[in-house]
C-alpha cells in the first residue's frame, strides 16, 4: 500500500469541522464518529466516548499543521507533526487478513484515536518528505477553510473543490466589474 494515501485520513478528519462555522460540526456525537469511520471497519466497533474527545483534539492538531503551512511557517508545521509522531508511534506489522495480499498495518495497538493518528501523521510525514510540504493546502475561497492535498503536477491548486474554484472565479470577476465601473471618466483629450 502507498503510505501517502494515509495522508487523506488527515484531510478527511480536518474537514469534519469548519473553524468559522461551528454549526457544521460533523463529529457531534459517538454515532457521528462511527459514521465517519465507516471506511475503517477494523476501528469502528472499538470506538469509545474518549475517542470522541481524542479525535476532535487530533483534528485541531492536524488543522494547525495545514494552517501553519498555509501561512508559510513550515517549521511550526513540522514541529507539530513531529510531536504527533512521538505521541502516536507506529509499530508496523504485516497482515494478510480477510484473504488480502500481504500488506502493512502501521500499528495494531492503542485506542482508535491512536491508530487513526499514527496513520494520518505518518501519511502526512511521508507525503511531505517525498512530494514536498507545499502539497498541503487550505482553500482560498473565503470563508471556506477546507484542507486539501495538492496532487496537481504544477502544484497550483488553491481551492478544495471545483465548487469553491468557480465561486472564487465569480467573486473575482464581480470585483473586477466593480473596479471597472468605479474608474473616473477620462476627460476628453481630443481636438
Ligand atoms: Zn489491513
Ligand atoms: Zn473550499
Image (spheres, helix red, strand yellow):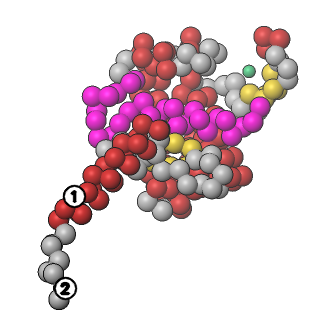
The percent coordinates of residue 113 (x first, y second) are 54, 28
What residue sits 43% from the left and 44% below the top? 165
Compute the Cα span from label 2 to label 1. Answer: 27 Å
Q: Secondary structure at mark 1?
A: helix
Does the stretch in magenta take in 133? no
Q: Which image quarter is the N terminus in? A: top right
Q: Is mark 2 within 8 Å of ligand 2?
A: no
- In the foreground, 167 or 28: 167
Give the image location of residue 17, x and y in percent.
38, 33
Q: Position of residue 120 (x, y in %)?
A: 60, 36
The residue to which callout 1 is attached is: 178
Say which residue label 2 marks: 190
Which residue is at 41% across, 42% downward? 166
Q: Residues within 10 Å of mark 2 (few under 14, many from 20)?
A: few
The image quadrant that residue 94 belongs to is top right
Q: Secondary structure at mark 2?
A: loop
Please report whichever mark, 2 or 1, sits nearer to the chain's N-terminal start. Answer: 1
Left or right relative to 62: residue 126: right
Task: Give left or right: position of 185 versus 64.
Answer: left
Residue at coordinates 65% horizontally, 35% vertically from top-left?
6
Depth-wise, is mark 2 or mark 1 nearer the camera?
A: 2
Residue furthest out toward the right: 102
Q: Is residue 34 left or right of residue 144?
A: right
Residue range (magenta): 1-27
Q: Residue 69 in the image: state x and y as whole percent.
A: 50, 56
Whether residue 119 can be seen here: yes
2 in the magenta segment: yes
Amino acid at each position: 500500500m502507498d503510505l501517502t494515501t494515509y495522508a487523506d485520513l488527515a484531510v478527511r478528519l480536518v474537514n469534519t469541522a469548519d473553524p468559522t462555522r461551528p454549526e457544521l460540526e460533523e463529529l457531534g456525537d459517538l454515532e457521528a464518529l462511527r459514521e465517519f469511520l465507516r471506511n475503517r471497519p477494523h476501528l469502528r466497533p472499538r470506538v469509545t466516548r474518549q475517542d470522541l474527545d481524542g479525535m476532535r483534539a487530533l483534528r485541531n492538531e492536524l488543522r494547525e499543521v495545514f494552517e501553519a503551512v498555509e501561512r508559510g511557517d513550515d517549521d511550526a508545521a513540522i514541529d507539530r507533526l513531529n510531536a504527533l509522531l512521538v505521541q502516536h508511534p507506529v509499530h508496523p506489522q504485516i497482515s494478510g487478513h480477510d484473504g488480502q495480499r500481504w500488506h502493512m498495518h502501521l500499528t495494531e495497538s492503542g485506542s482508535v484515536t491512536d491508530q487513526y493518528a499514527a496513520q494520518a501523521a505518518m501519511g502526512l510525514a511521508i507525503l511531505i518528505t517525498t512530494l514536498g510540504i507545499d502539497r498541503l493546502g487550505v482553500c482560498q475561497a473565503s470563508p471556506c477553510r477546507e484542507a486539501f492535498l495538492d496532487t496537481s503536477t504544477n502544484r497550483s491548486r488553491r481551492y478544495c473543490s471545483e465548487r469553491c474554484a468557480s465561486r472564487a472565479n465569480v467573486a473575482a470577476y464581480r470585483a473586477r466589474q466593480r473596479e471597472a465601473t468605479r474608474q473616473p471618466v477620462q476627460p476628453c483629450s481630443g481636438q
